[in-house]
Image (cartoon, coloured by chain):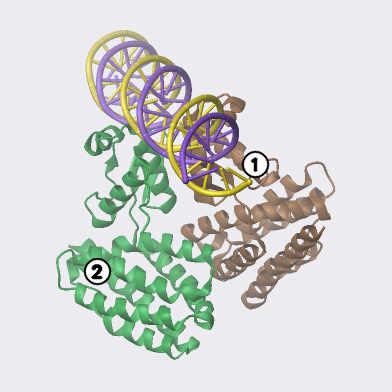
Chain colours: A green, B brown, C yellow, D purple
Amino acid sequence: MAIEYKTRTQLVVEILREKILSGEIVAGQPLRQVALADELNVSRIPVREALLQLEAEGLVAFEPHKGASATELNAAQVDELFELRAMIEGDLLAASLVHITDDALAQATDILVNLDSALGKENAANTWSELNSDFHNCLYSGAERPQTTNLVNILNKNADRYIRMHLLWAGGISKAGPEHAELLAFCQARDIDNAVTKLKQHILNSRDEIKAFLSQREAS
Amino acid sequence: MAIEYKTRTQLVVEILREKILSGEIVAGQPLRQVALADELNVSRIPVREALLQLEAEGLVAFEPHKGASATELNAAQVDELFELRAMIEGDLLAASLVHITDDALAQATDILVNLDSALGKENAANTWSELNSDFHNCLYSGAERPQTTNLVNILNKNADRYIRMHLLWAGGISKAGPEHAELLAFCQARDIDNAVTKLKQHILNSRDEIKAFLSQREAS
DNA sequence: TTATAATAGATTGTATAAAATAAGCAGAAC
DNA sequence: GTTCTGCTTATTTTATACAATCTATTATAA
């Protein structure tokens, strides 16, 4: 396997993204360029460029001469994001199932096993959300729509914060396990209609759980 | 009116975007940082940051240590892009029409008049695509979905290159004028189903014209 | 002759230093 | 007492300088 070269900017992007997704950097908190640069032992340029990239992903907001801060989504924005995902991912899945290989489905099955066993362990949230992303990407692999897939991944990075938060604080998306299994079964049967319906339901269910959790936390 | 401050990076973004959309910078051509910096009379840092932002918009591709180049879409990618737009914009229009104000519709009518008269004039392509974008955004204003609207605008920036190219070389999207009028009529009648159908048809029609044009140019 | 290694030039990536801008605060004017 | 002005400081933005990396060319050996 070829080792992949990474620029400092890319490394900083990954570290900061992880910090935001994990909640270590709380939303609204200003991200001071010098402080980050010192902490990560790089100059401010890679930090700036990393922040710019994260802005494009929607995780960070930049204001000229005021600096950057991690973004936060309110309930309405969570709604919007998950509904957008449901629509686009539904379409992507439909396109994928026409051409998907048995190989990809087998791989998805494997991931599902790991996904279930990941829940109890250390760093559950990190591992789980990564495997979850892998699982979905696997199902979309037949679509051969690079731009759409790319877009879906960006939207997922945004949603990921809330999924992780929910996983950590509330012990997980309660219905995700069985839903994944059902979804995979429909995919294996190449039953496009049911698979798409199930997927949309799955995404909107997690939206509902997260919104309920958010409003509950807000009330307290 | 408040004057808005712009950083050099933002100015460079706008200039480069315009150059790419207008075709002055041809796709595939490497974008040398020093050359651009000299030309625009800034240092390389704002140029780099501008290129990073354009990468997020999909107009530029960055490769570590090799530099940036303007991206080019092949026929399959044009397909994908326009179909994605049809789906998302259709959904956005449906959500918008429920709440859209008469004021917004009146504004759309005004824009349409300008749009028709813009075709013959100087700089037709630039003005036309800007007004076209305004027209569509006007129709989506009732949706109150900032993230989706933002996404649509990014996708449109990508599509814009091909629309402009087609406008310049082939004299315009032949059916756009009447289609816009029909679309607006359905919107004014709050006829959601017909409006959405018409919008999708409109987007997919321009896709077809552009694809036909692309393949014809390729053959020659 | 072909393939491989070495080298030079070009180009990008990063660090440091300087300039521009914004926010906060003290003091004057009303 | 309030409002405004000008200064100070903190922070970002940009420029310059240097280091790392890539590409193409030439030289060398099989």
Q: Nearer the viewer, residue A112 or B186?
A: A112
Which residue does the image show at 21% across and 63% down from the upper left? A217
The amino acid marked with disc number 1 is Glu
Decide if residue B113 is in sight here: no
SS category of the residue bearing label 2: helix
Which residue is denoted by mark 2 in the rendering?
Answer: A213
Is A90 left or right of B201, judged from the image as shown? left
Q: Quadrant of residue A209?
A: bottom left
- Percent x, y for residue B93? 59, 67
Which residue does the image show at 50% across and 74% down from the upper left? A92
Decide if residue B166 is in sight here: yes
Q: Chain of mark 2?
A: A
Q: Are marks 2 and 1 on the same chain?
A: no
Which residue does the image show at 51% across and 38% down from the upper left? B50
- Percent x, y for residue B172? 80, 56
Q: Quadrant of residue C16?
A: top left
For the residues labelled 2 and 1, say whether their Cβ atoms are less than 8 Å apart. Answer: no
SS category of the residue bearing label 1: helix
Q: Nearer the viewer, residue A50 or D2?
A: A50
Is A165 left or right of B36, judged from the image as shown? left
Is D22 left or right of B206, judged from the image as shown? left
The amino acid marked with disc number 2 is Phe
- Percent x, y for residue A173? 25, 75
Q: Quadrant of the N terminus of chain B?
A: top right
In the image, which disc is placed on residue B18?
Answer: 1
Q: Quadrant of the C terminus of chain B?
A: bottom right
